[in-house]
Image: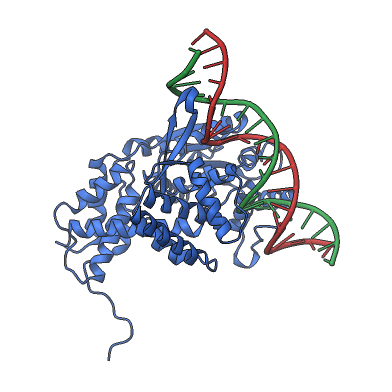
Chain colours: A blue, B red, C green
Amino acid sequence: MGGMFERDTDIYHNRDALREDYQPSRLVGRDKELERYKTALQPVINGEQPNNIFLYGKTGVGKTAGTRFLLDHLIDDAAQYDDIELTVKLLNCDGLSSSYQIATRLVNKFRDESNQISTTGYPRPTVYDMLWEELDSCGGTLLIVLDEVDHIQDDSILYQLPRARANENLSQAKIGIIGISNDFSFRDDLSPKVKSSLCEEELQFPAYDAQELIEILQQRADSAFRDNVLDTGVIELCAAYGAKDAGDARQSLDLLMKAGDLARDRDTETITEDLVRDAREELERGRIREGITGLTQHGHLVLYALITLEMQNGTPIRSRDIRPRYTNFAEQIGVDPLVPRRMRDHLGELSMLGIISAVERNEGRRGGTYREYSIDMDINMIVNALDETVTEVGIHESIVDLVDEDRTLSDYS
DNA sequence: ATTCCACAGGAATGAACGGAAC
DNA sequence: GTTCCGTTCATTCCTGTGGAAT
């Protein structure tokens, strides 16, 4: 008698090999970068004050993977020297916007489950005091990795951490900061004093080219899939999508895994190029849905306005011309429309999410500079995502009614 | 070379809100 | 309960900008 669950016997040999957190024994295409990285970490083994290292490069070019890889080896190797006590903490700053947040998470990284602190509520100095206490009680050499460090809005913690020792907040620990960022301009925006201390060693990770992506995918696919599962051209297609989007290996791997999952769902023996294309659409759908759930009510209204305008008159369209439609919608559901400045913020947010895109236009003295917005994806996809995620009672329905009216209006005109 | 349009987007400020501490 | 906090979403005011018009 079978249970409710049965184990899949399928195309995968080890699906985890495609996951982001998988650590291959060899990192493809990053030899030069890792060599320099290794040199920058050398002081740790020598028992000296570690360098602060700043790492930048676009998403999915091996910054985090390379860091994990080297630090694991560093921890192993440091264990062979009695006089080195090494502690490494890795914190992803995604979703954390302030130094305060970073400080609370760091404190929690050092404390065990039963002793965690809340991430709000404490006075800022209290949190810093707790942090110094945790750091100092660790002793030895301390490496703190701040991944996606550009998400932090204020650099207070970046200023405090490297100087903690000098300020006598620490007496025991030798501390080194490794900052990872995919936003190059972040480096320039840092205040000079932070820049000089945080960026002692700078490493740049260039995007993977198509060939490197193919090698990476090949390597992972070899461990992930059983033999003869991949159609010819599948790897290349995944690599091509990743290369088009700025040499992003993570994206390529996600795509390949999604294609594999689809194959599993559909009980097919092989992964074809068509399957990859389906997978891509599926991933796109997820991205949109995720983006849309994070939006405000007004964000949704702005999006509805753009959608209806797109269907009627087509896009691109400038924010000035979006506004009447948007205010109309807002009044329809009985909320005060936002001021134009704020509406532009929402448009900006939508284009950050890749749901819409903006091109800057300039008509000089006659027209000035402005942006033209257009919808970047399949409208039905967006409407479906809105349908699933917009929970405010009545908005979607009343807007859809309006959309239908628009449709019939434009049909007759 | 200078002027100037119409917007982009930064900065300051505030209201509302939720958690922690008293 | 009240008082401190930080966060989020919003408004208001403002400076910056690139190229057509002068």
Q: Is residue A392 left or right of residue A99?
A: left
**Which one is nearer the viewer's eye here, A118 or A259?**
A259
Looking at the image, the residue that sits furthest to the front is A413
Q: Position of residue C9 (x, y in %)?
A: 61, 53
Question: Horizontal and vertical percent for residue C11?
Answer: 67, 45
Splitting the image into 4 quarters, where does residue A260 fall? Answer: bottom left
Does residue A28 appear in this view? no
Residue at (34%, 39%) from the top-left corner? A207
Query: Quick one: which residue is furthest to the bottom in this view?
Result: A1
Q: Find residue A299 and report its horizontal and vertical position in percent.
A: 52, 53
Image position, residue A201 (x, y; %) = 49, 32
Side of A208 where A336 appears, left or right: right
Q: Quadrant of residue A387?
A: bottom left
A216 is higher (above) or lower (below) than A366:
below
Q: Image point 26% across, 45% down: which residue?
A: A213
Which of B21 and A263 lies nearest the eye of the viewer?
Answer: A263
Is residue A237 among the parts visible in the rendering?
A: yes
Q: Residue at x 60, y 28 (%)?
A: A192
Q: Is residue A181 above or below residue A126?
A: above
Judged left or right of residue C20, residue B6 is right
Towards the viewer: A134 or A210: A210
Q: Is A366 placed left or right of A18 in the picture?
A: right
